[in-house]
Amino acid sequence: MSANTRTQTATAMSHSQSHLTQTRLEKTWVPWVPNRLSKRRGSSVPQFTNSPTMIVMVGLPARGKTYISKKLTRYLNWIGVTTKVFNVGQYRRDATRAYNSFEFFKPDNAEAMKIRKACAIAALKDVWEYFTSEQGQVVVFDATNTTPQRRELILSFAKENSYKVFFVESICDDPEIIAENIKQVKLSSPDYIDCDKDEAVADFLKRIECYKLTYVALDDNKDRNLSYIKIFNVGSRYLVNHVQDHIQSRIVYYLMNIHVTPRSIYLCRHGESELNLVGRIGGDSGLSARGAKFASALQTYVRKQSISELKVWTSHMKRTIQTAEALGVAYEQWKALNEIDAGVCEEMSYEEIQENYPEEFALRDQDKYRYRYPKGESYEDLVQRLEPVIMELERQENVLVICHQAVMRCLLAYFLDKSAVELPYLKCPLHTVLKLTPVAYGCKVESVFLNIEAVNTHRDKPENVDVDREPEEALETVPAHI
Amino acid sequence: MMLDNEEYLVDACQRELTQNPLRKIWLPGKSGHIAQRRVCMTNCPTLIVTVGLPARGKTYISKKLTRYLNWIGVPTKEFNVGQYRRECVKIYKSFEFFSPDNEEGLKIRRHCAMAALNDVRQYLSVEGGQVAVFDATNTTRERRGAIVKFAEQNGFKVFFVESVCEDPDVIAQNIVQVKLGSPDYIHCDTQEAIEDFMKRIKCYESSYQPLDEVLDRDMPYIKIMDVGRRYLVNRVQDHIQSRIVYYLMNIHITPRSIYLSRHGESDLNIKGRIGGDSALSARGKEYGTCLRKYIQEQNIKDLKVWTSQMKRTIQTAECLGVPYEQWKSLNEIDAGVCEEMMYEEIQEHYPLEFALRDQDKYRYRYPKGESYEDLVQRLEPVIMELERQENVLVICHQAVMRCLLAYFLDKTAVELPYLKCPLHTVLKLTPLAYGCKVESIYLGVDAVNTHRERPENVSVQRSTEAALKTVPAHF
């Protein structure tokens, strides 16, 4: 008997024991008698992280390590891999009251070296805590980690605890990029809060020099058994070594698709639809009169913005396509941008859902992110479906995405780093364009209402989410409609 | 203040949209629609150029990449210069042909490369191909320069794929697997063939100029080192190149097998109904038991088991008594309004739909449902993970299994929806040389036949009997 079948089968697994039950919330089939055979219920994609993984940044200051750390963490969390950043600089700021000057970073400053090493170790301890108590799956260890000794320290720590390690080294020798970097994120750092601009820049450049003295990049020969990606000059070239598993492969793919070219992403919903007017969800209806007006106003808005080489994307549903048609420019249809499939509740009003499926309605309010409509989808499913859209948005520059309420919530949550709890309640009203512009470590949002009235389709979480609540309590937060 | 979009229509208010009856795609009613059906991955065609000494896996990569791109819907074709050479020089004598001082040989080889490039131009510019894979050694800077020039003249993007390997074991294995069976060595014994081939490699070595980090820094390329242990990726220009890089970084050549099977026979299967989420029939459960036995006998190392999120595949996996993973993307094709109907009922309620489906089963989308084409897109991450993995058993559904099988066996969109994937039969796929060996194992438990052949009459005016002619028997 193979090792596979030796495990788990001690319990007399009679072969008619394929007795399954469907979880009420996520609608996933699980064994009636719990066993450990079916892993990770509820999610639409298997979890491919077995051992916890440490992503370790490497690079001189102002090489984009923190930018990459934060962005990667945001992406991983969005696709459902619990990830956290540990920025050693933050530990250092907490340990040393006030930052004086670059002298702190001189390699011969014994006192400072002690503090810096202690900070790294404190951070590692918190990493251990995160993996152990908080069930985190990935940690991004954001520090310069520019010496083999420091990296060896981390590798030993990881080995002791059976964590996988993947290094991300950012190498850049373009002085313009570094200068831009310093301007964007260093000048406003707590370290330089009381300095004038030129002082800060001068000091920071000297800080970089301190690191250069002891910087040893990952070595193609000596480090050939390590797993890493080297990013050269903000992505014009990559060296990828010994990718071990699925999550590392996904990380590499993501890192190779992001860029720092300034651009804006415009998110909006289709114009108001016929079904919107009567308070019904889903379906494939056309635009109402006001919806058509919005499409026209959108065209005006887009033209005024004077966007260079704007790409326009829609779903496969009539209402987004009609909206795009009004723009008079080429657009691409993505099936992946279709609205969440409400299954048996398609084209129902909330009142009808309460009448016909009161339990479902309550379950949805209990956990709106994981709740899957019978024969339909959940927000969790939506995120998986939208991942290729996000990946392509990262590759692109100026894009206008004309989509739907639930879809827009998912995309917005990605850009604004919203949790699974917040995501399904993000406000994405009709006839409002959200202009997202990456800035520093995050995203600036401008909300532009194009001044065409529309129904409100946003239903807040009601107070009572019990399955035995009264219909009035269930329908308390349903927005007005015809 | 105009947008930079060429196809700008001045008169852009509310064109009527109609839904294409086959694909259920909304398009502007009149002429000149500017909406593209799905993400257009390439604007100008792309020329992928392999680089590397003989026996470095260039043809393996070329064929595999071509298969993948075609499967995801990017028309791709490979052009193997060695093939052109074989057609030109009918009989291969020896490695001497490849000697760098063989003027005659060099002339012929250059001519063959040109002929191949001409066919590339024909494919990309005239025949509507989107990607061409130019499979040759292309080991000199001069040759690559000529190709880049050719591409520029024709408006093609270029992306180089270089395979570098110095591991003698890997090279020896390569020679055994694919060179010994080559037409060049059809009349040689093994020892002779190997010796000659090694000398052939030597002929290329002295003039080999690998892609250089400095000299080629503006060239888009991926350098694959040591069969995927390390990659150098330079200047990826666009979406398709990014997908190609991702794919190349996920494939491996470690021997393994992929087992494809459907769930055991279900209650709806017996009734001749499609879709739904029913449980296994008694025979279906029996199949689960037999599958367990089969798996045990196969003694597969570290087998991963995947199912869909539908009851019938999970029940089947439960019978195996080993851990398994659920993928929603492995769910059966969504038949929309036709879910849980019998073919007879579909013919009765939706005769037009039924006929359209027979006309183009690959692109046909059920009303409020999916098409095979949609399925392929949804299955792409599954294929990508299958490439990463080693031994895997996938318990899925008829349409899904057809899509996966088409990927492994390089079947076209026309053949795909009619591939035979009967119940209670395991297909064991083992990569071999440039392709895939298939073993079909029927596990001896009876089941209904769910395979409906394309009927002769696919016209929307056909009679009911003509439509239902090929419906398999059921209760």
Image (tube, rainbow, N blue to C red):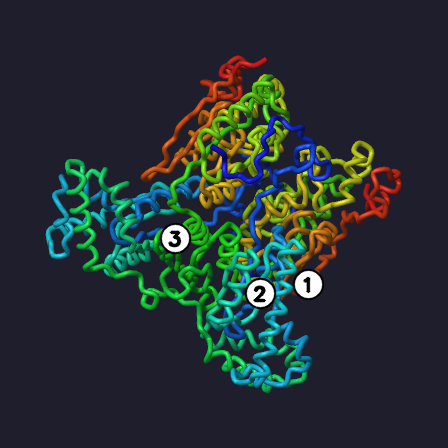
Q: Nearer the viewer, mark 1 or mark 2?
A: 2
Q: Of the residues under marks 1 and 2, which one precedes in the sequence? A: 2
Q: In the rendering, at what x and y percent does residue A335 appear?
A: 59, 38
Query: How far is the residue under mark 3 from the one under mark 1?
Result: 44 Å
SS for dot 3:
helix
Looking at the picture, which amino acid does disc 1 mark?
Glu
Taking the image as shown, residue A175 lies to the left or right of residue A165, namely left
Q: In the rendering, at what x and y percent does residue B195 appear?
A: 55, 85
Question: For the residue carrying disc 2, how many other residues have a C-alpha within 10 Å: few (<14), some (14-19), or many (20+)?
Answer: many
Query: How far is the residue under mark 1 from the one under mark 2?
Result: 32 Å
Question: For the residue carrying disc 1, how many other residues have a C-alpha within 10 Å: few (<14), some (14-19), or many (20+)?
Answer: few
Q: In the rendering, at what x and y percent does residue B472 appear?
A: 82, 46
Q: Is residue A236 visible?
A: yes
SS for dot 2:
strand
Looking at the picture, which amino acid does disc 3 mark?
Gly
Taking the image as shown, residue B330 lies to the left or right of residue A237, namely right
- Are the residues flagged by discs 3 and 1 in contact, CB closer than 8 Å? no
Q: Which residue is mark 2?
A: B134
Residue A481 or residue B310, whichever sits in front:
A481
Q: Which residue is mark 3?
A: A235
Q: In the rendering, at what x and y percent does residue B258 appear?
A: 60, 59
